[in-house]
Amino acid sequence: MALVPPITDLEQLKGHPALGRLLGWNPAAVAGAKFDRDEMTIWVERAHIREACAILRDDAECGFNFLSDVTCVDWYPAEPRFEVIYHLLSIPNKERIRLKVRLDGASPAVESLTSLWPGANYFEREVFDLFGIRFTGHPYLRRLLMPEDWEGHPLRKDYPVEGYR
Amino acid sequence: MILNMGPQHPSTHGVLRVLLEIDGETVVRIMPDIGFLHTGIEKTCEAKFYQQVVPLTDRIDYLCPMTNNLCYVLAVEKLLGLEIPAKAQWMRVLMNELTRINSHLVWLGTHALDIGAMTVFLYCFREREDILRIFEMASGQRMMTSYFRVGGLALEPPLGFFERVREFAGRFPEKVDEYENLLTGNPIWGMRTKGVARMTAEDAIALGASGPTLRGSGVDFDLRRDMPYSGYENFKFKVPVAQDGDVFSRYMCRVRELRESIAIVQQALDGMPEGAIKADAPGIVLPDREKMKTQMEALIYHFKIITEGFAVPVGEVYQAVESPRGEMGYYVVSDGTAKPYRVHMRAACLANLQTLPKMCEGGLLADVVAAIGSIDIVLGEIDR
């Protein structure tokens, strides 16, 4: 299982059903793609993430009907600083895909997926709690794991591991 | 009336607080409140070497440590592009299925105890003790095993290990009959579980439920069979599915899984390949003690791995395994250094807990306890 370099060329990858479907819908919504270690990653423009997920969920061929996970990576001090990461699973096709949205550090916000999958609720609250990303349209965006009166967002890279004392 | 259940309540399996709005005996609204066990494990991982994260993964879900070990090491091995020897893979499967039985036994015992069947608890913990002794024999630890390492296993299974597992696997099926005799046909058990806390397949998928919580609603999906990892494609087993979506369905799924798991253990024992238990990857896998005493290179590699760790190529991986509770996923991001840039755990329980309002609202207050038991939550995993 030797490692092969990732493929990032959209032309080469557009045979992938999910990417093909998104490019066919709106090429401007796709900001990039990567096929690495047998995993497909698509970068989606921030404004289009909810619609893109809706298309992948409802498309008969793709069938990504299960939202596995929502999380975030902080690339501080680089900009755009945050990447919100969605892992979708297709139960009928037994296949996974990863969608990513890049967000600026100044005021990171992205549309909530709770209207598509109510299960996004806790995942998004966790990301809001630990990274400070706002999910617009979320029904109950409050801290999930940290105490209500906690200051700061612990999983950000500029937050010290041992906390503030 | 607003009622506060927990955080220290015997039926919440840890420290779960549930806010209940009730109208007489009927639950109008229910809201779980979590975070009491949050320890920031994901943040801690970022400050450790890759191999130092393994013991942390045990502590997320203390009822299935090996499943978490496995998921994490598979993710790192995928990042590294490591090939794992067959014996290590089969041992991992064997230990994982024992872990599943261990976890299901704790679930069954406590779930029955919550609903009022006291004896089952004692029966379940009797067999669980045998499994913990097997774990102790292999890894030196009963619960926090840390038995899997990046690249293979920590130790060769000791002499007499397979005989002991075989002996356990031989007598376990009749123990499952014992549990079933106490519960499955029991009219009180039936009244407390059948038709209680129902959830449809559509709701289960929309809410992100997985594992027996999903299969109890009639969705036939199991990662071990449908997206195999660690050599599960070599094993023959059925995936129990029940259609009713109530507490009893989820109970039946897990009890039947006990039987399937022990069948997998038997297959693993019968077909256990010979060979190495660690990948041939010096610089990543710790050398044998014996070699360290005789070979200079082995000593140097040992020193380097311990003091500097090993660098992992840039990339990201999402690896999911079927834990006893559902889809346990590790998302590991590497920036090319010896410490993970980000480790995220997709906890099956966190998503499963979201189904609680769907199950309980409109039902009776007493059924909340049955519903919480039936989704088999572990708060350590939810809060991380």
Image (cartoon, coloured by chain):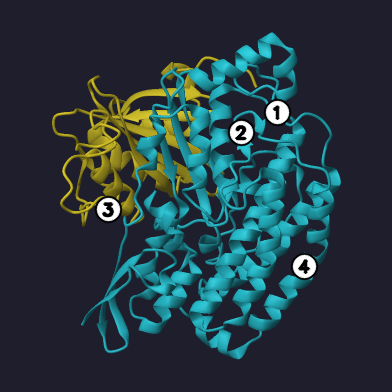
Chain colours: A yellow, B cyan
Residue corresponding to mark 3: A144
B53 with respect to B166 (left or right):
left
Vertical order, B106 against B261 (above or below): below
Residue B278's mark?
1
Q: Is residue B312 visible?
A: no
Distance of mark 2 from mark 1, alpha carbons?
9 Å
Mark 2 vs mark 3: give the one in front: 2
Residue furthest out toward the top: B296
Q: Secondary structure at mark 3?
A: loop
Q: Residue at x 62, y 71 (%)?
A: B252
Q: Are marks 3 and 4 on the same chain?
A: no
Q: Secondary structure at mark 4?
A: helix
What residue type is disc 3 on?
Leu
Q: Residue at x 22, y 39 (%)?
A: A153
Q: Could you say where residue B235 lies in the image, as x and y percent from the top left?
A: 76, 47
Tag 3: Cα neighbours inside 10 Å, few (<14), some, or many (≥20)? many
Distance of mark 3 from mark 4, alpha carbons?
41 Å
Distance of mark 4 from mark 2, alpha carbons?
31 Å
Residue A38's mark?
none
Q: Residue at x 57, y 28 (%)?
A: B78
Considering only order in the chain, which callout, 2 or 4, is on the residue closer to the N terminus? 2
Whether tag 1 and tag 3 are in contact, CB under 8 A, the answer is no
Residue corresponding to mark 4: B173
Distance of mark 4 from mark 1, alpha carbons?
32 Å
Vertical order, A148 against B330 (above or below): below
Considering only order in the chain, which callout, 1 or 2, is on the residue closer to the N terminus? 2
B43 with respect to B115 (left or right):
left
Mark 4 vs mark 2: give the one in front: 2
